Amino acid sequence: MNKYINEFKQEAVARSKIAGISNTCKELGVSKAALSRWRKEFSVGKLTKSKDKPGYEDL
């Protein structure tokens, strides 16, 4: 099972809104089920940038 950081998931969700789910899955090598789950999590606010770990822009 692959683990992806939230930032990757957020980018994948954003990309899927432009390029579509199928194209995004092919480009990124993720399953449609995973991307669909991330889209749902993002829409309900579960998938957000981690506040615990600083991002690149915070350094």
Image: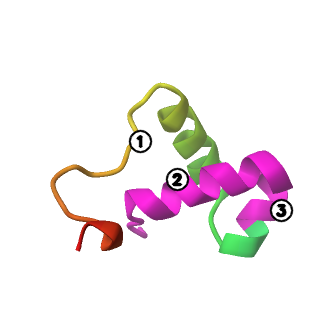
Q: Which colour scheme is used?
A: rainbow
Of the numbered discs 2 and 3, the one sitting upstream in the chain is: 2
Q: Residue at x 63, y 43 (%)?
A: 36
Few, some or many residues within 10 Å of mark 1 (<14, 14–19, 20+): some
Residue 39 visible in the displayed image: yes
Cα separation, mark 2 vs mark 1, equals 7 Å
Q: Where is residue 51 in the image (x, y as percent from the top left)?
A: 21, 49
Q: In this figure, which residue is indicated by the disc labeled 1?
A: 47
Q: Which residue is drawn at 33% across and 73% down?
A: 56
Residues drawn in magenta: 1-25
Q: Position of residue 37 (x, y in %)?
A: 55, 41
* Front-most of residues 51 and 8: 51
Whether the residues at callouts 2 and 1 have beta carbons within 8 Å, the answer is yes
State which mark lies toward you, 2 or 3: 2
In what element is the residue under mark 3? helix
Cα separation, mark 2 vs mark 3, equals 16 Å
* Front-most of residues 25 and 46: 46
Q: In this figure, which residue is indicated by the disc labeled 2?
A: 10
**Quadrant showing the C terminus:** bottom left
Q: Where is residue 18 in the image (x, y as percent from the top left)?
A: 81, 51
Q: Which residue is drawn at 38% across and 34% down?
A: 46
